[in-house]
Image (spheres, rainbow, N blue to C red):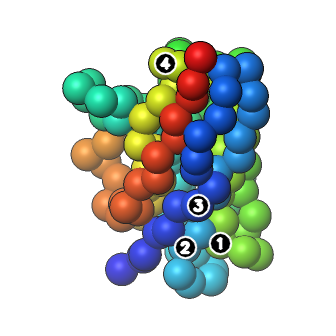
């Protein structure tokens, strides 16, 4: 079992930047990859980013590509999401997830462990 805890959310203005974190409760983490997802009010959960834990390979959802950057610190068992040029459509609860099995995926049902989520609100 892996416990994930998000932090760093809050209220920002459109155009601002924000970095959120996801810390796991053990080291070494022992997972293959981690992801960020988000759920906006009244919408389905949306894939945001993926990063493989050993190689650092990453990819992004279309709506955040070029604005968001995912990174990790293996020693701290922590994943980060740097969000730049935020807009009101980025308002959502952001959740991190971890996947034990090999293979890159954006599908939420292929991640075994989930954090509680953290609110990010962007005002116009």
- Real-space CA distance between mark 1 and mark 2, rounded to the nearest whole angstrom: 5 Å
Q: Quadrant of the N terminus?
A: bottom left
The numbered disc on residue 7 is 3
- Point out residue 48 in the picture as x, y percentages from the top left corner: 50, 33
N-terminal-most mark, 1 or 2: 2
Q: CA distance from mark 4 to mark 1?
A: 29 Å
Q: Which residue is mark 1?
A: 77
What's the residue at 58%, 61% (across, down)?
A: 7
Label 4 residue SS: helix
Which residue is the site of mark 4? 89
What residue is shown at x 66% (from left), y 44% (from top)? 81
Q: Nearer the viewer, mark 4 or mark 1?
A: 4
Depth check, mark 3 against mark 1: the one in front is 3
Element under disc 1: loop
Spatial CA distance of label 2 from label 3 is 12 Å
Residue annotated with mark 2: 24
> Is residue 24 visible in this depiction of the protein?
yes
Disc on the earlier residue, 4 or 1: 1
Quarter of the figure with residue 78: bottom right
């Amino acid at each position: 079992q892996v416990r994930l805890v998000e932090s760093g959310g809050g209220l920002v203005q459109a155009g601002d930047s924000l970095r959120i974190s996801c810390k796991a409760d053990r080291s070494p983490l022992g997972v293959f990859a981690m992801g960020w997802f988000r759920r906006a009010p009244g919408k389905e959960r949306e894939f945001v980013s993926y990063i493989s834990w050993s190689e650092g390979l990453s990819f992004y959802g279309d709506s955040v590509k070029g604005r968001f950057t995912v990174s990790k610190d293996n020693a701290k068992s922590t994943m980060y999401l740097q969000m730049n040029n935020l807009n009101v459509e980025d308002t959502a609860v952001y959740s991190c997830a971890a996947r034990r099995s090999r293979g890159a995926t954006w599908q939420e049902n292929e991640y075994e462990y989930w954090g509680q989520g953290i609110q990010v609100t962007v005002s116009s």
